[in-house]
Image (cartoon, rainbow, N blue to C red):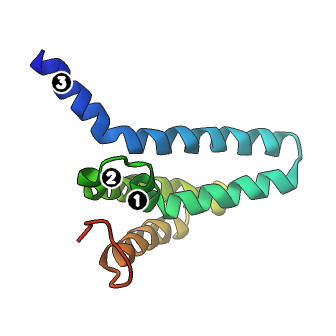
Amino acid sequence: MLLLENSTTMLAKYLAVIYFCVLFSILFVLHIVFAANDNHLMFRSVAIIITVMVFLCGPICVFFESSKDRYKFSFNAGMTLSSLLSVGLGWAYNDMSMDFVMIIFPILSVLIHYIIKQSPAGDTYGLK
């Protein structure tokens, strides 16, 4: 019984990240569908949403998190995920080739998350 409770707690711990990943995956598939069908307006709209999601993954995961006790964990997990996704985003923005953008985007992502975490303005949801 203890094993079941621990696995449920572990799942709850990652639930916000799972929600983010599901939403991101749906949008990623949609951007491929829109590109394949030459629907440029919808493709660009979804690409902008994906870009914002990548750079603000931590705060979005906190938004999905239901327990204030796990805000810090969700934010840090989102920041880690954001760093990884931003490498792929840099590759996509560089016409599917390697360049310095693949290094700049993860640095920018960590910087954005650091600024949000250290923000003196407003409620930081216990992130400090």
Marks 1 and 2 close (CB-CB < 8 Å)? yes
Identify the residue shown where x is 69% and y is 56%.
Answer: 47
The image quadrant where one finds the C terminus is bottom left
Query: Where residue 31 sits in the image (x, y, percent)?
Result: 72, 45
Q: Is residue 97 shown to the viewer in this render?
A: no
Identify the residue shown where x is 44% and y is 55%.
Answer: 63
Please tell me which of labels 1 and 2 falls first in the chain: 1
- Disc 1: CA contacts within 10 A as few (<14), some (14-19) or many (>=20): many
Answer left or right for 36 relative to 123.
Answer: right
| Residue type highlighted by circle 3 | Glu
Query: Where residue 83 sits in the image (x, y, percent)?
Result: 41, 59
Q: Quadrant of residue 71?
A: bottom left
Answer left or right for 12 relative to 109.
Answer: left
The image quadrant where one finds the N terminus is top left
Q: CA distance from mark 1 to mark 3?
A: 26 Å
- Disc 2: CA contacts within 10 A as few (<14), some (14-19) or many (>=20): many
Which of 42/59 is in front?
59
Q: Quadrant of residue 75?
A: bottom left
Query: Where residue 98 sits in the image (x, y, percent)?
Result: 56, 60
Which of 33/1 is in front?
1
Please tell me which of labels 2 and 3 falls first in the chain: 3
Secondary structure state at the residue bearing disc 2: helix
Identify the residue shown where x is 10% and y is 20%.
Answer: 2
Query: Where residue 92 sits in the image (x, y, percent)?
Result: 63, 56
The residue carrying mark 1 is 58
Residue 31, relative to residue 22: is it above or below?
below
Q: Residue furthest left?
A: 2
The residue carrying mark 3 is 5
| Residue type highlighted by circle 2 | Ser
The residue carrying mark 2 is 74
Which of 36/12 is in front?
12
| Residue type highlighted by circle 1 | Gly
